[in-house]
């Protein structure tokens, strides 16, 4: 199918190295190879605007330094490429290998297969590993939100003890390539699943309803997702959804009546507020004081090595966060994002998007473990925010 076709088109064997997009969520196009310099570009697929997700594997037959160069700028993040030497089980940043936002080197010490990605990946297999760890936990109920357009199961997780008085809906990957958001989501769930009184009190106070991969097909196939034509998943809440997942999320919200809707994202690849975690205010003015409360709780809960500042909230009407962002001149398809659309539900006290940078919180490089820990802090903030509800 699609994967196989790409593999034929972009599988090249030159000199002593092979590049392939045939790996989970693979995405790469080889434009040219000269000496030991490889010219690459990301596959845009059905995304209108130039974006920056890529992931490929390379097989090196002999030691040596290779240059990987993208045809366009802004393809490599602030901490270089993420690299895996064990076929995707573990990933590490390679900041020293980065020559610019479009070029990095790889010093192959011994022959073998190496995987490269723009960020630290998080796919269904990571989610499965996480949920398997808690399979015996009676508070966790796994089911299916719906089937994706391509027939994949779209996961729904419900986490509660008994019949809590409050519900919250947590979603991620409306933009499929926003990987760091998933690690933070997992951390928040680990907080709620932990042993001890605090977690038990959380589970009895709030039922979490979690959709970890909203654009399920895009996540698994390695699409850009952002600005997808004819419509971006995160602009599909204007009342006539075209995707089964967004229709099902909206239905879920109507059914469980959450006081909190939190939609996790990752921002642009580098620069300014893209390098600090932040909440995004939307046009629903009634959410703003609630957002400020929640932001302060998250600031207090965030660990020193993964700082979060309430003052970094991206206010409505600033930077990209304007009405123009919701018409077809920017992200594909006129329409509302989830948290803005939630203004229509009077039972929602706060609906807000949280942006998690791909690689660093200001000067602090983030590892997978630290994203998880920040997620635990997010869980703590959700618990404290629930405690504030009447
Ligand atoms: Zn996003």
Image (cartoon, rainbow, N blue to C red):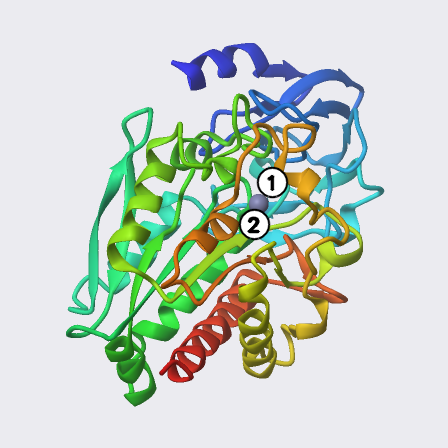
Total numbered labels: 2
Q: Residues within 10 Å of mark 2 (few under 14, many from 20)?
A: many
Which residue is farthest bottom? 197
Contact, mark 2 vs mark 1 (Cβ under 8 Å) = yes
- Residue drawn at the location 70% of the way across and 24% of the way down: 41
Location of residue 288 with respect to 223 vertically, above or below = below
Q: Quadrant holding ligand 1?
A: top right
Location of residue 322 with respect to 159 vertically, above or below = above
Mark 2 secondary-structure assignment: loop
Q: Nearer the viewer, residue 193 or 79?
A: 193
Q: Residues within 10 Å of mark 1 (few under 14, many from 20)?
A: many
State the residue position of label 1: 117
Give coordinates of residue 319: x percent, y percent.
Answer: 77, 50
In the image: residue 342, left or right of residue 356: left
Is ligand 1 closer than 8 angstroms to the Cβ of mark 1?
no
Residue 309 visible in rendering? no
- Residue drawn at the location 76% of the way across and 28% of the way down: 70
State the residue position of label 2: 120
Q: Quadrant of the C terminus?
A: bottom left
């Amino acid at each position: 199918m699609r994967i196989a076709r790409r593999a034929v088109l972009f599988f090249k064997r030159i000199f002593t190295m092979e590049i392939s997009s045939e790996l989970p969520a693979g995405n790469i196009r080889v434009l040219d190879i000269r000496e030991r310099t490889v010219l690459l570009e990301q596959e845009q697929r059905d995304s209108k605007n130039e974006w920056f997700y890529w992931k490929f594997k390379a097989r090196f037959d002999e030691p040596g330094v290779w240059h990987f160069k993208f045809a366009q700028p802004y393809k490599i993040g602030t901490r270089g490429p993420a690299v895996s030497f064990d076929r995707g089980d573990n990933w590490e940043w390679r900041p020293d290998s980065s020559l610019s936002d479009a070029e990095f080197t790889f010093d192959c010490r011994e022959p073998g297969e190496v995987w490269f990605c723009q960020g630290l990946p998080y796919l269904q297999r990571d989610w499965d590993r996480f949920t398997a760890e808690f399979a015996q936990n009676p508070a966790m109920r796994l089911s299916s939100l719906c089937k994706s357009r391509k027939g994949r199961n779209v996961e729904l997780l419900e986490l509660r003890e008994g019949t809590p008085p409050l519900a919250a809906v947590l979603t991620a990957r409306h933009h499929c390539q926003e990987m760091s958001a998933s690690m933070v989501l997992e951390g928040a769930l680990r907080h709620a699943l932990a042993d001890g009184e605090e977690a038990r009190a959380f589970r009895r106070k709030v039922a979490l309803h979690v959709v970890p991969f909203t654009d399920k097909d895009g996540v698994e196939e390695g699409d850009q997702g952002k600005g997808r034509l004819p419509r971006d998943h995160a602009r599909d809440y204007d009342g006539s959804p075209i995707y089964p997942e967004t229709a099902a999320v909206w239905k879920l919200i109507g059914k469980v009546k959450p006081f909190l809707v939190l939609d996790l994202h990752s921002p642009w690849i580098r620069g300014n507020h893209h390098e600090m975690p932040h909440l995004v205010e939307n046009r629903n003015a009634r959410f703003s004081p609630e957002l400020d409360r929640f932001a302060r709780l998250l600031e207090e809960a965030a660990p020193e090595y993964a700082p979060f500042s309430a003052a970094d909230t991206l206010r409505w009407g600033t930077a990209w966060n304007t009405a123009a962002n919701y018409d077809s001149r920017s992200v594909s398809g006129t329409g509302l994002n989830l948290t803005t659309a939630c203004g229509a539900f009077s039972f929602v006290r706060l609906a807000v998007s949280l942006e998690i940078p791909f690689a660093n919180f200001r000067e602090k490089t983030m590892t997978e473990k630290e994203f998880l820990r920040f997620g635990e802090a997010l869980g703590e903030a959700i618990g404290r925010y629930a405690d504030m509800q009447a």
